[in-house]
């Protein structure tokens, strides 16, 4: 009796009995076709993970901020992003050491939510000295000591995220 190997390809046995030679050949070709079809399905799924999408807007501005640049490219479960923002709300009080209350700049839209702890702001531009991120958005937590954070303060950051 014929069996399928670990790749799904038909392995003939001496005891295989078919009415016609074409029936015997078609039995093997059918198993091979099924195996190739399954491989093509897996390959198509992999190709969608490695083909970058177009530019998308991953965030919504938090209260008191506007976003001038809000772009991301997804590549499978990775997102490369860049955000440029302006403080539109009232000035934020800066402590002498540069700490400010944790303040949300932007929140992630559905489909752009990173795995907790898997958002990596890679660069920022002064006056902001420290960003941190959660799976809800990006926050500013410190500025250069001795600086101010008035209305119209601008900044930008870019980085990588692993998406949920």
Image (cartoon, rainbow, N blue to C red):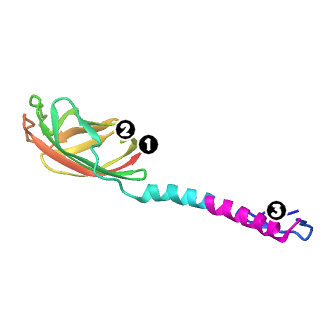
Q: Position of residue 6 (x, y in %)?
A: 73, 63
Residue 3 image label: 3
Q: Are marks 2 and 1 in contact (CB under 8 Å)?
A: yes
Q: Earlier in the sequence, mark 2 or mark 1?
A: 2
Q: Is residue 5 left or right of residue 133?
A: right
Q: Do we see residue 145 in this rendering?
A: no
Q: Position of residue 115 (x, y in %)?
A: 42, 42
Q: Do we see residue 37 in this rendering?
A: yes
Residue 164 image label: 1
Q: Residues within 10 Å of mark 2 (few under 14, many from 20)?
A: some
Q: Nearer the viewer, residue 115 or 18?
A: 18
Residue holding disc 2: 135
Q: Residue at x 90, y 71 (%)?
A: 14
Q: Nearer the viewer, residue 130 or 98?
A: 130
Above or below 12: residue 72: above
Q: Position of residue 11 (x, y in %)?
A: 80, 67
Magenta residues, as a range?
19-37
Q: Secondary structure at mark 3?
A: strand
């Amino acid at each position: 009796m014929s069996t399928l190997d670990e790749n799904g390809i038909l392995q003939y046995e001496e005891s295989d009995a078919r009415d016609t030679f074409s029936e015997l050949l078609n039995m093997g070709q059918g198993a091979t076709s099924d195996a190739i079809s399954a491989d093509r399905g897996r390959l198509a799924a992999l190709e969608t993970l490695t083909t970058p999408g177009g530019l998308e807007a991953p965030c919504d501005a938090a209260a008191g901020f506007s976003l001038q640049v809000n772009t991301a490219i997804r590549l499978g479960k990775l997102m490369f992003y860049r955000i440029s923002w302006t403080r539109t709300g009232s000035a934020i009080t800066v402590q002498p050491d540069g700490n400010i209350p944790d303040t949300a700049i932007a929140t992630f839209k559905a489909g752009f939510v990173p795995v907790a702890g898997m958002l990596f702001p890679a660069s920022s531009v002064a006056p902001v000295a420290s960003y941190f991120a959660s799976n809800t958005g990006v926050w500013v937590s410190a500025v250069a000591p001795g600086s101010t954070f008035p209305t119209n303060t601008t900044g930008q950051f870019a980085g990588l995220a692993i998406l949920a």
